Amino acid sequence: MSGGATLAAETGHEPLRRPARIGPALDRLAPLLGLAGLGLVWFAAGLVLESVPGYAAFAGFAPGPALASFAELLISGEAWRAAAPSLLRIGQGLAVAFGLGAPLGLLMGSSPLAERILQPPFQLLRMISPLAWMPVAVLAFPSWDGAIVFLIAAAAIWPILFSTAAGVKRVDPVWLAMARNLGAGRLATLRTVVLPAVLQDILTGLRLALGVAWIVLVPAEYLGVTSGLGYAINDARDTLSYDRLAALVLLIGLIGYALDSGLGRLAARARWIPAT
């Protein structure tokens, strides 16, 4: 008698079966199933908005009017005109955050003393909402664009910094010892061992930073600018154009999803295996 049959005879229960592996086709369709579920929820919410008299003013959020307005945004080119300034600000803010966060993360990860010194103030600053800096940014920068880029950088720096530091601390000491034994100096070790080893962590931190920055972008663009997705959202709200507002929300979600997917693919390909 097999082990499973013996166990079943002794306990009176059928042995647990391993779950069948998801087929390749179903695995590829899984994301579409999730999006379809979200679409059904949106459709059901639209029916509620249309059927309840108290919500009739918000019927533009329903899929029909929103998708029609979304198509109009694309055809007229307004979608690109709204998204281009926002993408430029996101790019600038992430560049500033990366330029500061990655080197500081390398320093904290490689120096225990630097980590003990910098960890408390950085954790304190990380817990402050980036939008709390809005009055300071308005006073400190001569242009609204500069203030928005500062707010985006203030939100995005921490995922990059702490993810980079964590990656450096996970670098195998044997690799570092081998580099030193082969005559590599600090800069050479950093360039040939540390940076390739932590590249995936840096890109993962950049991906997390993008998500945070994309959330901060819309309220930051409520400042005095007259362009961008946040400005377009504010304008649609003020004019009670709820179908256009829903279309802009959909546009923001799609652009953010595309950017996140791109960085996710880059991070997945950045795994480094040292040559033996």
Image (cartoon, grey):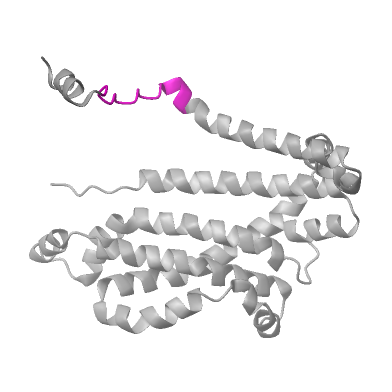
Q: Looking at the picture, does residue 23 appear above or below residue 168?
A: above
Q: Which residue is drawn at 21% across and 71% down?
A: 186
Residue 89 at least partly seen: no
Determine the image quadrant of residue 88: bottom right
Outermost residue toward the left? 181
Q: Which residue is drawn at 16% across and 24% down?
A: 10
Residue 132 coordinates in the image, percent (x, y):
63, 77
Numbered circles on residues, count: 0
Residue 158 coordinates in the image, percent (x, y):
46, 69
User: Which quadrant holds the N terminus?
Assistant: top left
Residue 131 coordinates in the image, percent (x, y):
64, 73
Outermost residue toward the top? 1
Span colored in magenta? 13-27
Residue 38 lies left or right of residue 116; in this view the side is: right
Residue 156 lies left or right of residue 20; in this view the side is: right
Residue 241 coordinates in the image, percent (x, y):
88, 50
The secondary structure that dominates the magenta segment is loop
Question: Per the image, is 29 magenta?
Answer: no
Q: Looking at the picture, does residue 125 appear above or below residue 64?
A: below
In-front residue for pair 208/140: 208
Q: Residue at x 69, y 68 (%)?
A: 220
Determine the image quadrant of residue 5: top left
In-front residue for pair 22/19: 19
Residue 26 at least partly seen: yes
In-front residue for pair 174/240: 240
Residue 231 lies left or right of residue 91; in this view the side is: right
Q: Which residue is drawn at 22% across and 65% down?
A: 188
Question: Per the image, is 24 magenta?
Answer: yes
